[in-house]
């Protein structure tokens, strides 16, 4: 046997001073006690105490007794100990690791006591992980013989605690996005704590206020009847067309939550179904079990479609079989789709991360390598680069999407149009318009999707917590006639989807009145059409076309960019005249350092007003509750991060155009004359990957939540247009439609 498996039963045990569940994000002191086993620990041997890489518990520190995370380590026999902590210093997923070296030996029965968040010197303690985990483990490894070959303690000797959600901080109301008149649908109501965990702490009653009559909708509901903070009302129906929104009101008549918009039409050729097809569970680098993962997506995130994308080099053959069993079990056409798949996790130099999904269970897993599955896997299905992956998948009923995570996909290295219909432009890792732009520059016709790649056990509602992820996880809306795998794969291959950073707007894009037009259905098939929809590849004889769009959203529409590939054709901004004189300014930080793993940008911002008083300040995309905005009548301060997307602060001034602003950003000073600000963006670039400060004047009141528009686009013979929307909403969310590809052939 490998030495690292040698006699774990004689290596001792560990316990922790927690007998009942701990609230997510709570400040506390944890006392972990290791008791040496039969061998004791030799001089220069020691311990590693690890918790999961996804965890955002306060990092231990040893030098500042009054600061968060102050940690003390002592031995019962007085042995001298050397303690240090670092992230990513142990085999994943146990990367967050406290290293303890024994400078003197320990005998059997001697103990080492670790006090995480020792409050004796004035520290507030350690803040627990902010997301729910049913069995949060502190994994203890022992180097009893000073060989630096650590033995993991048996499961029964490992410290494990339960982390439960906290008090209610907000409510969420979820409707489907497109349904037909007279068709049944469901309404979801959810209570979340401040970190985004569904919580059953809400026992209140609420009134439901509907913008249109809804058959079967109760006037009052009780969240006491919710399951783990989520209440699902089935069998609702609308008997006329329109846009439905529902408000949740407390007993004082205050609105605590507003739903997204449900478009109800007399005839629907398709419905809109929402997916998060990319996340991980605790069997790889995520949190909780794969069963709990799928259950969360269906029952708590209330999405329609879910995939599991564990890193291939952590998926053993036995876990691959288990995943296939779970997707078969959870897949329920008409109610919820669970799709088998994995993440091919090659380094960027050999193609980078790609998501793979199969239409059916029982298909092979083709790994990039076998780094962490040496025992329970075989070499026969290893694909050493993305070109080989596409070659092995060419006869499979599979879908592939290029992903930007720790290892970003290099789509120029390998691409197969039949297998890879789309690229992923947003996840919890950030926002990556550049991967679509790379594909377009290479001449590829791809759609646009988003997902979470969530590691925190919250697929479909993936908040970033207090860790390194700077964005909420994304969602994809699929345009399908029915909710089943066949419809999903057909629609996916035709790029019939649009992507968002986590919101659920209704978006419709179409090009009508086409002449002599054919639409590519597959690599070898085409059909005559008179209209092009999202994702279509169309040839026609029109000299010009009307590119039309229709949006209805939960939040105001800040801007709609109509793009042709990488080129901006036109920007639509609602209420342009009110913008010119608005007292509200949006100060926006955006961009990334570069494409790789260290893309995160730390922003330290102070805004000072010379004459006009600051009346109010509101954060946008501040997903980490620790990142607060403070202000007085003359200044606003904040610290936050971006990872390719943006965060912003809206500032309401007493007077719109009086005086100036001084913006101090990471040591750089920007002077803004308020009299020169109009409806156009004022952009100050900071290098990196589109790092910038953007200053925009907005109307005082909220923007409209719906808009219909059209743009005439000329077509030249033989030149392909790649037309799509990139929409930014007032609350900071963004949506992208897959392009309509149009070519005039005569």
Image: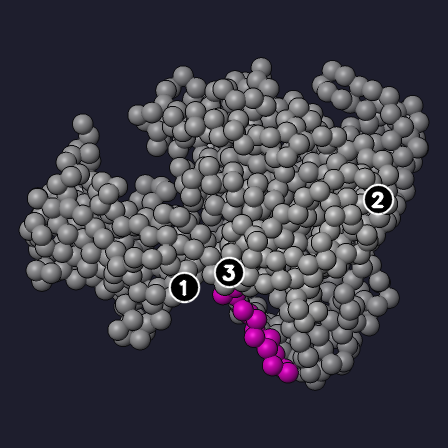
Q: Earlier in the sequence, mark 1 or mark 2?
A: 1
Q: Provide residue 241's location: percent of width, then percent of height.
A: 85, 45
Q: Earlier in the sequence, mark 3 or mark 2?
A: 3
At a point 86% along the width and 66% down the height, the residue shown is 577
Left or right of residue 593: residue 709: right
Q: Quadrant of the N terminus?
A: top left
Mark 1, secondary structure of its residue: loop
Q: Provide residue 655's location: percent of width, then percent of height.
A: 76, 80
In the image, residue 436 sits, relative to residue 24, either above or below, namely above
Q: Provide residue 306's location: percent of width, then percent of height.
A: 57, 36
Which residue position holds label 2? 239
Q: Earlier in the sequence, mark 3 or mark 1?
A: 1
Q: Toward which corner of the image does residue 632 lie, by quadrant? A: bottom right
Q: Quadrant of the C terminus?
A: top right
Q: CA distance from mark 1 to mark 2?
A: 47 Å
Is residue 423 at all visible to an observer of this figure? no
Bounds of the magenta segment: 625-638
* Of labels 1 and 2, the one closer to you: 2
Which residue position holds label 1? 26
Which residue position holds label 3? 201
Q: CA distance from mark 3 to mark 2?
A: 35 Å
Mark 2, secondary structure of its residue: loop
Question: Which of the pair 8/413 is nearer the observer?
Answer: 8
At a point 54% along the width and 69% down the height, the residue shown is 628
Q: CA distance from mark 3 to mark 1?
A: 15 Å
């Amino acid at each position: 046997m490998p030495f690292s498996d040698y006699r774990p039963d004689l290596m001792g045990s560990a316990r922790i001073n927690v007998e009942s569940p701990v609230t997510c994000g709570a400040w506390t002191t944890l006392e972990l006690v290791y008791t040496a086993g039969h061998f004791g620990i030799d001089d220069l041997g020691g311990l590693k105490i690890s918790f999961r890489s996804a965890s955002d518990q306060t990092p231990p520190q040893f030098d500042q007794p009054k600061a968060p995370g102050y940690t003390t380590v002592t031995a019962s026999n007085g042995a001298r100990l050397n303690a240090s902590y670092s992230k990513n210093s142990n085999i994943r997923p146990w990367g967050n690791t406290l290293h303890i070296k024994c400078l003197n030996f320990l005998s059997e029965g001697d103990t080492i006591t670790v006090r995480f968040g020792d409050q004796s010197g004035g520290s507030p303690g350690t803040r627990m992980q902010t997301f729910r985990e049913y069995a949060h483990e502190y994994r203890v490894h022992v180097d009893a013989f000073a060989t630096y070959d650590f033995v993991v303690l048996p499961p029964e000797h490992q410290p494990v605690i339960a982390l439960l959600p906290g008090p209610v901080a907000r409510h969420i109301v979820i409707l489907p996005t497109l349904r037909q008149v007279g068709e049944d649908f469901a309404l979801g109501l959810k209570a979340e704590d401040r970190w985004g965990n569904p919580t059953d702490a809400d026992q209140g009653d609420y009134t439901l206020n509907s913008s249109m009559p809804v058959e079967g909708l109760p006037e009052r509901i009780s969240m006491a009847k919710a399951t783990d903070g989520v209440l699902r009302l089935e069998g609702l129906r609308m008997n006329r067309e329109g846009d439905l929104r529902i408000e949740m009101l407390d007993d004082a008549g205050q609105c605590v939550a507003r739903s997204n918009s449900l478009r109800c039409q007399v005839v629907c050729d398709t419905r809109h179904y929402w997916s998060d097809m990319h996340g991980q569970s605790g069997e790889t680098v995520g949190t909780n079990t794969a069963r709990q993962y799928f259950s969360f997506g269906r029952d708590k995130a209330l999405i329609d479609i879910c995939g599991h994308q564990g890193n291939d080099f952590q998926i053993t053959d036995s876990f691959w079989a288990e995943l296939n069993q779970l997707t078969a079990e959870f897949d329920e056409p008409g109610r919820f789709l669970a799709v088998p798949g994995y993440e091919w996790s090659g380094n960027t130099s050999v193609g980078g991360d790609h998501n793979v999904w199969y239409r059916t269970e029982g298909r092979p897993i083709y790994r990039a390598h076998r780094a962490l599955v040496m025992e329970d896997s075989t070499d026969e299905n290893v694909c050493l680069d993305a070109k080989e992956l596409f070659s092995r998948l060419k006869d499979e009923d599979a879908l592939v999407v290029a992903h930007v995570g720790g290892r970003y996909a290099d789509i120029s290295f390998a691409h197969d149009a039949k297998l890879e219909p789309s690229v992923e432009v947003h996840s919890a890792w950030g926002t990556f318009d550049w991967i679509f732009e790379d594909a377009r520059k290479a001449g590829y016709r791809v759609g646009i999707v988003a997902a979470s790649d969530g590691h925190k056990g919250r697929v479909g509602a993936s908040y970033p917590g207090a860790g390194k992820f700077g964005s909420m996880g994304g969602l994809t809306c699929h345009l399908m006639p029915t909710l089943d795998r066949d419809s999903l794969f057909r629609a996916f291959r035709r790029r019939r989807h649009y992507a968002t950073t986590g919101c659920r707007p209704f978006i419709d894009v179409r090009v009508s009145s086409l002449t002599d037009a054919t639409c590519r259905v597959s690599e070898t098939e085409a059909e005559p059409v008179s209209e092009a929809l999202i994702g279509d590849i169309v040839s026609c004889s029109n000299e010009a076309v009307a590119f039309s769009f229709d949006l209805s959203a939960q939040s105001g529409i800040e801007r709609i960019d109509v793009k042709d590939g990488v080129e901006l054709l036109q920007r639509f901004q609602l209420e342009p005249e009110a913008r010119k004189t608005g007292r509200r300014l949006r100060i926006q930080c955006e961009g990334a350092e570069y494409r790789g793993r260290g893309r995160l940008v730390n922003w330290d911002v102070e805004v000072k007003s010379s004459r006009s008083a600051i009346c109010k300040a509101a954060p946008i995309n501040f997903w980490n509750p620790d990142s607060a905005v403070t202000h007085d009548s003359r200044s606003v301060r904040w610290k936050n991060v971006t990872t390719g997307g943006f965060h912003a602060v809206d500032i309401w001034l007493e007077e719109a155009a009086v005086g100036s602003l001084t913006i101090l950003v990471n040591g750089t000073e920007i002077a803004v004359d308020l009299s020169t600000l109009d409806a156009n963006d004022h952009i100050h670039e900071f290098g990196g990957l589109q790092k910038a400060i953007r200053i925009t004047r907005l109307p005082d009141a909220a923007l409209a939540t719906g808009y219909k528009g059209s743009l005439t686009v000329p077509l030249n013979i033989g030149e392909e247009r790649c037309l799509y929307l990139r929409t930014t909403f007032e609350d900071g969310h963004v949506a992208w439609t897959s392009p309509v590809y149009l070519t005039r052939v005569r």
